[in-house]
Image (tube, helix red, strand yellow):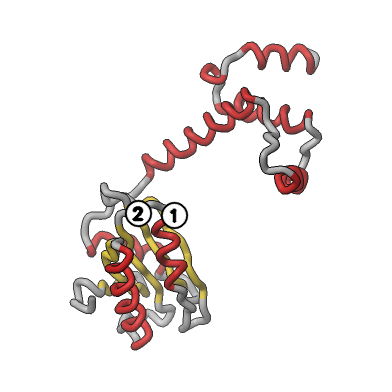
Amino acid sequence: MTKEIKNTVKQEVSIAEMDRDQLLDYLKDQLQEKQVNTFDDLFAMLKEDLTSVVLDEKGMQAYLAILRDELASKATDLKSLSSSVEVGQYLADKYSGLKQEELHIICINNANKVISDTMLSKGTINKSIVDLRAIFRTAMECNASGFFLAHNHPSGKLSPSFADQDLCERVCDAARIMQIDFLDNFIVGDGNFLSFREEQLM
C-alpha cells in the first residue's frame, strides 16, 4: 500500500474510531509532513510562533483524544489518603530509601485523592533548601484543596530539627493567609514516619 493510499485511509477514519496506535500514527505523519523530525525541531517551531499550530484540526483532535486517555488512566490510579497513618506509610514506603534529603509537596483534591507529588528541593545528606513561594505556587497550580509536606532523613532518625519545626510554623502561618489547608508535615526514614499533626507539633 502506497503512502498516499495509506494517508487516504487514515483520513477516512474519524478520530472517535481510531485506537491509540492509529492516533499516534496520524500525529507522527503530520509532524513528518511538516519536517518536524526531532523535539528540537518542534520546540524551535513553537518558540518561533506559539500561535502557529503544527497540527491540522484533525491532528489536534487526535492529540486531545490521547491526552484525555492519559488523564483518565492516571485518574484511576490516584491514591486516596484518608488518615495521617495512611499518608505517613505511603510516604515512608516511597521516600525512605533516598540518599539525599528531599522535600516534597503532596497535593490532594476534595476527595482526598493525590493529584500531584512534586519534589520542591533536593539537598545534601542532611539539608534541603526551602522556598515558601514554591510550596504555595505548586498547590495553587494544582488547584489543590489541601497539601502535605514530606521530607526524608537519610539517617533514619525521625526527630524534627529546629529547621524542620521552623519551616512547619512558617508554612502554617502562610497557609492560613492563603486559605489553603496545610494538612500535615511528615518526616520519613528507614520505612517509618513521624507526623507533626499526630505529635501535636502543628
Which residue is rendered at x = 70% and y = 34% of the image?
54
Residue 157 to residue 197: above or below: below
Instruction: Please rate how many residues cluster around mark 2, counting C-alpha atoms within 10 Å: few if below 14, some from 14 to 19, many from 20.
Output: many
- Pinpoint residue 59: horizontal percent, then vertical percent: 64, 27
Along the viewing direction, whichever of 53 and 166 lies nearer the viewer: 53
Residue at which label 1 appears:
141
Q: Secondary structure at mark 2?
A: loop
Q: Is residue 151 left or right of residue 181?
A: right
Residue 25 to residue 37: above or below: above
Along the viewing direction, whichever of 126 and 165 lies nearer the viewer: 165
Q: Is residue 129 left or right of residue 179?
A: right
Q: Is residue 182 left or right of residue 21?
A: left
Which residue is rendered at x = 34% and y = 83% of the image?
166
Amino acid type at mark 2: Ala
The image quarter in which residue 199 lies: bottom left
Which residue is rendered at x = 54% and y = 32% of the image?
64
Residue farthest along the bottom direction in this orientation: 162
Q: Which mark is residue 144?
A: 2
Quarter of the picture holding the C terminus = bottom left
Instruction: Please rate how many residues cluster around mark 1, counting C-alpha atoms within 10 Å: few if below 14, some from 14 to 19, many from 20.
Output: few
Amino acid type at mark 1: Glu
Q: CA distance from mark 2 to mark 1?
A: 8 Å
- Pinpoint residue 134: horizontal percent, then vertical percent: 46, 67
- Pinpoint residue 61: horizontal percent, then vertical percent: 57, 26
Which residue is rendered at x = 71% and y = 12% of the image?
8
